[in-house]
Amino acid sequence: MSCDQKNYAIMSSSNSHPNGDTETIGGIVQSHAYSILSAHEVDYEGGPFRILRMRNPWRTGEWEGEFSDKSDCWTDDLKAQLGHEDKDDGVFFIPYRDFWTRFDMTEFAMLLQEPVPKKQLRMDQSSKEYFKITLDGDYDTKNNVFGINVQQQGERFSTFKRDQNPYRASDVNIKLYSLTGETPELVKSETEYTTNSFMKSMICRERTLAAGEYLLEVVINWNAEAEQQREHKDAVVDLICKDDAGFEMLSKQESLELLKNIEFQG
């Protein structure tokens, strides 16, 4: 609900299906993108109840389960609280518990008034690299974008949207350490496996980053396919930051010097 309260744009994809978006289950078009308009917590049956308001961009076809337009779950009080209307306009409500079983990916974006600069460095034929990020001043990530993208390159990436993509993405791990204090501190890590995703992102939005130096660790566990076809063993790393931050790839010697005091966490 915090993303909704911050007025982020939120999108969610329904569960993938071999027949793509020609298949509909429970009113939800499969392999299809929906927008999340708002998130709510209301009192229902004597306790807190979470529910989402969503929209099918096709402007027709809606969820058919509990709290769908014609569901018996609606009370006059809930209709008034949530602004429910019985229209076939693609807008519908769905309980959190049903959302988690019907949708498999959710993404959000901070709405900005101006573009955010991006700096890019390349990991060529490498499985692990370290980068130094330098912030000249304190950086408020709650109101400004600070993110890292790691995007696998080559034909593997350029064909990943095709229906018959023969390539598989390799797993990527990202960790960011602060070097601004007396001892290094792990700021954030993204180490969970993402199914066949050619781009891995890490967005910091929970804190203010103090001025100073940060160490970014990027590890790509290249799969057998990438190892065999080395022209596919390539990736770029993006730093997305409003301020003019320093961003450089470290040599092995420089990395060793910075790593001496860091106890890595799994």
Image (cartoon, rainbow, N blue to C red):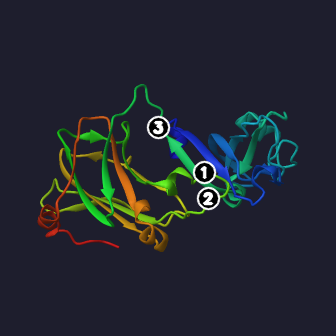
- Where residue 258 appears, as percent x and y from the top left, is 14, 63
- Where residue 111 appears, as percent x and y from the top left, is 48, 32
1 or 3: tag closer to the N-terminus: 3
Residue lying farthest to the top in this orientation: 113
Closer to the eye: label 2 or 3: 2
2 or 3: tag closer to the N-terminus: 3
Please, what is the three-letter code of the amino acid marked with disc 3?
Met
Q: Are marks 1 and 2 in contact (CB under 8 Å)?
A: yes
- Could you tell me how far apart the alpha carbons at marks 1 and 2 are, in whole angstroms? 7 Å
Near-viewer residue (254 or 7): 254
The quarter of the rendered structure image containing the C terminus is bottom left
Residue at image position (70%, 57%) is: 15
Element under disc 3: loop
On screen, residue 170 versus residue 72, left or right, reads left
Element under disc 1: loop
On screen, residue 202 versus residue 19, left or right, reads left
82 shown above or below 183? above
Residue 161 is marked as 1
Please, what is the three-letter code of the amino acid marked with disc 2?
Asn
223 shown above or below 26? below
Please, what is the three-letter code of the amino acid marked with disc 1?
Lys
On screen, residue 118 versus residue 17, left or right, reads left
- Where residue 53 appears, as percent x and y from the top left, is 69, 41
Q: Which residue is mark 3?
A: 110
Q: Which residue is mark 2?
A: 165
Label 2, residues with CA under 10 Å away: few <14, some 14-19, many ≥20: few
Closer to the eye: label 1 or 3: 1
Element under disc 2: loop
